[in-house]
């Protein structure tokens, strides 16, 4: 009888151990919570998912039209590649993972200076658009080859000086500009070389006919630049895209400038509002501010200049069909900071500068 009691007890202990282990030592699970900013979809779908410990889960981010994938956040070192749209996460802990999307490509913090310049002269869009770029490289990006190129001046005053070198409104003498031909505004052919000359302007490079008094602290640098003309080298949008991809804002000129507001869209990455405008009818001038354009008379050289800071590919914000857009800072105070305009519109030329 004693031996039977011992056997029953042993069996009971064995059953307890087996059952106890099956309850206490079952598979460990973690929760994977998926989320996404505006502009795309994710796989696994948005929401909570139960995963086994050490399970490798495939992640996929799919941008919608006009958007691009930026990165994954929230997974720490368990994500295989945080900047790849298709990657994996190893579930070594509970994670909340977010797929981040951006509306096109946008260079951050480029100034948005408006006309008139300090002198108050009209038809100063090209020097003002270029002053945004000079201020960006000098004071925002702090580029080594742009230090003190603006001499610490406000952009409106920088625009005044740049306008001299661009022969805006015939303010430069014949030795520098095109001669006294009575034109208004800036010829597109003078935008890039005029800016390069302004940048190089220092004590050793004062040019044949001295421009206005050089501001204290102005440092000269050697920059390069190129121009893409619609009637000479019709590269067009690829030229702009390459510059923005390289992180370089550029000046873009249109033969005329008449925009109709469409809608506003917020970029989920930067939080910036992108104001979508449509092209209005062809026009000869504007009154607020005053600008006169003679690009309608055949030569296509004088129109309206803006600072291009980004682009959006294959976008359909107005329901008119997918197309490419440029994002620009206009030089008018009456327009928003970031304007998206349909490409090409009345495009005339693009002008890059490389510090």
Image (cartoon, rainbow, N blue to C red):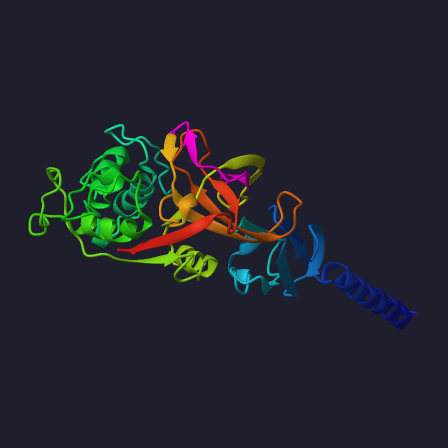
The one nearer the camera, 130 or 41, is: 130
Q: How many marks?
A: 0
The one nearer the camera, 84 or 145, is: 145
Does the magenta segment cover residue 279? yes
The one nearer the camera, 293 or 98, is: 293
Quadrant the C terminus occupies: bottom left
Compared across the picture, whether 275 is left or right of 123 comes to right
Per the rendered image, the range of residues in magenta is 271-289
Query: Looking at the picture, how far across and down is residue 231, in whole percent?
Result: 41, 58
Residue that appears at 15% across and 50% down: 220
Residue that appears at 71% across and 56% down: 50
Query: Looking at the picture, how far across and down is residue 215, in whole percent?
Result: 13, 38
- Residue 105 visible in this rendered orientation of the protein: no
Quadrant the N terminus occupies: bottom right
Query: Looking at the picture, how far across and down is residue 268, in whole percent?
Result: 55, 44
- Residue at the far left: name it: 204
Query: Looking at the picture, how far across and down is residue 176, in whole percent?
Result: 16, 48
The one nearer the camera, 74 or 121, is: 121
Q: Quadrant of residue 53?
A: bottom right
Above or below — where is 109 with respect to 49? above
- Residue 205 visible in this rendered orientation of the protein: yes
Does the magenta segment cover residue 45? no
- Residue at the far right: name it: 1
Q: Quadrant of residue 13?
A: bottom right
């Amino acid at each position: 009888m004693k031996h039977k009691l011992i056997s029953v007890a042993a069996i009971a202990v064995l059953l307890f151990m087996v059952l106890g282990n099956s309850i206490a030592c079952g598979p460990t699970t973690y929760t994977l919570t998926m989320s996404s900013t505006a502009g795309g979809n994710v796989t696994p779908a948005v929401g909570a998912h139960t995963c086994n410990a050490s399970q490798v889960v495939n992640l996929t981010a799919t941008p919608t039209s006009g958007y691009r994938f930026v990165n994954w956040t929230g997974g720490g070192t368990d994500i295989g590649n945080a900047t790849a749209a298709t990657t994996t996460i190893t579930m070594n802990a509970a994670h909340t993972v977010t797929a981040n999307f951006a509306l096109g490509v946008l260079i951050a913090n480029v100034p948005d200076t408006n006309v008139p310049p300090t002198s108050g002269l009209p038809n100063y869009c090209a020097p003002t658009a270029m002053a945004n770029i000079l201020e960006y490289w000098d004071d925002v990006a702090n580029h080594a080859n742009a230090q003190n190129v603006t001499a610490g001046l406000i952009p409106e005053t920088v625009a005044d000086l740049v306008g001299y070198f661009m022969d805006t409104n015939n303010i430069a003498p014949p030795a520098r500009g095109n001669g006294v031909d009575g034109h208004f505004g800036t010829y597109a052919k003078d935008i890039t070389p005029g800016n390069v000359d302004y940048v190089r302007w220092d004590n050793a490079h004062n040019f044949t006919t001295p421009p206005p008094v050089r501001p204290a602290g102005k440092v000269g640098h050697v920059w390069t630049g190129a121009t893409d003309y619609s009637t000479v080298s019709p590269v067009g949008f690829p030229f702009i895209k390459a510059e923005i991809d390289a992180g370089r804002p550029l000046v873009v000129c249109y033969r005329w400038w008449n925009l109709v507001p469409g809608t506003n869209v917020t970029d989920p990455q930067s939080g910036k509002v992108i104001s979508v405008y449509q092209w209005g009818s062809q026009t000869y001038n504007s009154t607020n501010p005053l600008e006169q354009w003679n690009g309608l008379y055949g030569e296509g050289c004088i129109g309206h200049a803006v600072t291009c800071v980004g682009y959006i590919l294959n976008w359909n914000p107005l329901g008119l069909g997918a197309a490419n857009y440029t994002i620009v800072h206009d030089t008018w105070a009456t327009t928003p900071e970031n304007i998206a305009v349909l490409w090409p519109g009345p495009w005339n030329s693009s002008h890059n500068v490389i510090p």
